[in-house]
Amino acid sequence: MSQQPTPTSLRNFLIIWLGQLVSDIGSQMTTIALEIWAWEVTGKATTLALVGFFGLLPSILITPISGVIVDRFNRKLLMMLGDTVAVLTTIVLLFLYINKYLQIWHFYVAAAFVGTFSQFQYLAYSASISLMIPKQHYTRASSLDFLSHHSAIIIAPALAGYLYKVIGLFGILLIDISTFLVAIFTIFLVQIPQILQTEENQKQDTFWQDLRYGLRYLSAQKSLLNLLLANLLFFFAHDLGDSLYVPMILSRTGNNTLVLGNLIIAAGFGGVMGALIINKWGGFKNKIKGVFLGIIGVGLTKIVFGLGRTMWVWIPPQFLCSLSFTVSGSSDNAIWLAKVAPNVQGRVFAARSLLLQLASAVAVLIAGPLADNVFVPAFREGGSLVGILGGIFGTGTGAGIAMLYVICAVCMFLVGLGGLSVRSLRNLEKNTPDYDEVEV
């Protein structure tokens, strides 16, 4: 039986990646500019939080369906569709702003609309990587995605902050439209191989059977399921702690946004440095070791970060945390690309993404109440933990949040240690063949 043609070059992937990098910077600039505009209009933090909520909710709801569609339809067209919807939405916002019709609820609708189609774009892009590049470069390609994300974190805030004063929201929206056009053009330029139709592919399941396929696949692949469970534990602890990050910094510094900005920049540089190292080095030969050593690094650095109280203590672990996160994430993505066949990656990656998003949503929902109702009161004057742990964490709101943050970091560290200790995980790459090594 014929096999999927083996790609021999990174060229097409790099062209698309460059277009996505430009688009990411433009999108980040627009997000920041819209937040500034909304804050000027309403002065309410809840307004900004709801934009993120309306962007996340449709993504969770649409993920299972998007996986089926990505495996059934042309992935290049789906990628172009996602970017096209985003640029049209930006044009609508620009029209409303020019004509002085723009209101806050327009952001919610736009976030929901873009969030829906960006899920198609993201899954189509992720499931096309193994069709475009040789297997030995999977880790490098994954690291480039982290490079794109962290580069946007460094570049976009500075550009948006400066340009908002010079050209305003109007000018930044125009820039964003231009960057989306660059992304669409780069996808149009290159050839993205289509999935080779096998006998299994041609046995067309019903749409509803396809919806369940990703979960059935994970249930059957015990090693990958164990890796996913480890990731769920890690990201639950990570996102719970991450929800406390900004309140912890601001409460420790008297609402000093300059410190917060410097820490975000340090995180960006750490991620960029990690991506460059992985790209040059190629990553761990035993990728599962890279996953869990990276998680251990994230846990350790976050423990140090949570115990710190000043910017100069926070910056080094912040830098190293992002570097470690990139090492772990690049290795993890490379494993999934190597083990899951391209013709089912849309459905399997969608099931994986759905479970991770649900874990993240639960973590975000409980983080605030847990901090406000349990840990913060325990560190107020006369609180139950002041006498025991006050010497380590201090007192007040920041101390209570910091303790919960450190607990989350310890949990991440234990997930990393556990992953290296469990034989089925440690030997995952030996026991689970790559998709192109399976006899068909």
Image (cartoon, rainbow, N blue to C red):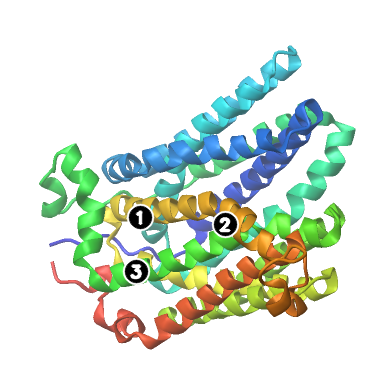
Give whichever of 88, 372 is nearer the camera. Answer: 372
* Mark 3 crowd level (few <14, some 14–19, many ≥20, 10 Å Cα): many
Determine the image quadrant of residue 95. Answer: top right
Q: Classify the position of the C terminus by image quarter.
A: bottom left
- From the viewer's perspective, is the residue at label 3 or at label 2 nearer? 2
Dot label at residue 338: 3
Instruction: Answer yes or no: is residue 149 visible.
Output: yes
Along the line of sight, which residue is nearer the eye, 136 or 38? 38
User: In the rendered view, would you say 55 is above or below 402?
Assistant: above
Residues 427 and 335: in front is 427
Q: Amino acid at mark 2?
A: Leu
Which residue is identified by label 2? 370
Q: Earlier in the sequence, mark 3 or mark 1?
A: 3
Residue 362, percent across and down?
Answer: 46, 52
Q: Which is in the foreground here, disc 2 or disc 1?
A: 2
Q: Is residue 378 left or right of residue 294?
A: right
